[in-house]
Amino acid sequence: MTKSCVVFAISVDSEDRLFVVTEFLDMIKARYSDCDVYIGINYGSHDKIESIIESYNLNAKYRRLTDPFFHTRSDDSAYQIALSLLHESKKTYDVCWFVHTKGGFNGREEQRKLYIEDFYSRRDYIESKFGQLPHLGVFGYRSGVYWVDHTNPVQPHITNSFMRNIWSEEKNSEFKYDLCKVIIIETMFALRGELIHNFLNKYEDFFTSKLRMFFFECEISNLLSSKQGYYQGLVDKRNWATKESMKPLFDEWIETNKLYHLENYFDLI
């Protein structure tokens, strides 16, 4: 049986948007009540959030970000706090589900409904694929095309080893492969547990570093998987903007890195 957890990032500062928190907690209660839940509450979020969490009687640990220095003005800093709780627990999981309060500061009603009703509802199917396909690293809903500034691929001022090693164009013992140009978007995804556990164990400076906005959308949900030779699963296998199939980009990545054992993954997912 798959052992899973939920990593939940909350960023809601106004009372009239607290319903976004309850919508996601309703989903977690209905579909993930057997899971440990690690919740990061972003800096400046509404002071009723802790009591709302408590009312759900989940197997949850939560922590609020209190230092404004680490606030990224996005879900990244809340995810960072949630992962500190996961890491401190010393528990390991087969699959980690990443959830954040999409629409906590704006509308995004359609996007939130899409993920609650048509992504997190696929838990059994997605977890079965992680079990069947040993080189499936991450599973998201939809994707776009990754961009890389080849004129300055590795900023010399990046001192955080976890960020520098992921981005380096020089292969290293951990990140051996070129990145896949397919990028899972919207920062809600399921990740193979060993990838995040190994990352957090090796790069503890992650917890004491200020992240840049989109760190989870770029590095964690994409590069962490593809640069270690793991495939990215998608519900919608088309480019979200152009509606073109992503298969040519997956095939290019497989050919570039000689990962021929992944050639049938597109059709198996």
Image: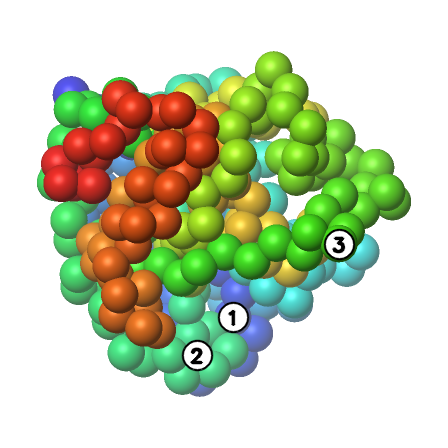
Q: Position of residue 168 (x, y in %)?
A: 69, 35
Residue 257's disc is none
Look at the image and tell me whether residue 97 can be seen: no
Specify the quadrant that holds the C terminus.
top left
**Farthest residue, direction top:** 173
69 left or right of 129?
right
Cα distance between the residues tagged 3 and 1 = 37 Å
Say which residue label 3 marks: 151
Q: Can residue 151 be seen from the camera position used here?
A: yes
Instruction: Report whether 94 appears left or right of 186.
Output: left
The crowding category of the residue bearing disc 3, from other C-alpha atoms within 10 Å (few below 14, some 14 to 19, many at least 20), is: few
Q: Which residue is mark 2?
A: 17
Kindly state the secondary structure of the residue where label 1 is placed. loop
Identify the element where label 2 is drawn: helix
Which numbered dot is residue 12? Answer: 1
Please state which of the two labelled residues, at mark 3 or mark 2, is closer to the viewer: 3
Name the residue type under label 1: Val
Q: Is residue 187 above or below residue 32?
A: below
Q: Mark 2 near mark 1, Cβ–Cβ under 8 Å?
A: yes
How many C-alpha atoms fall within 10 Å of the one at disc 2: few (<14), some, or many (≥20)?
some
Comes first in the chain, label 2 or label 1:
1
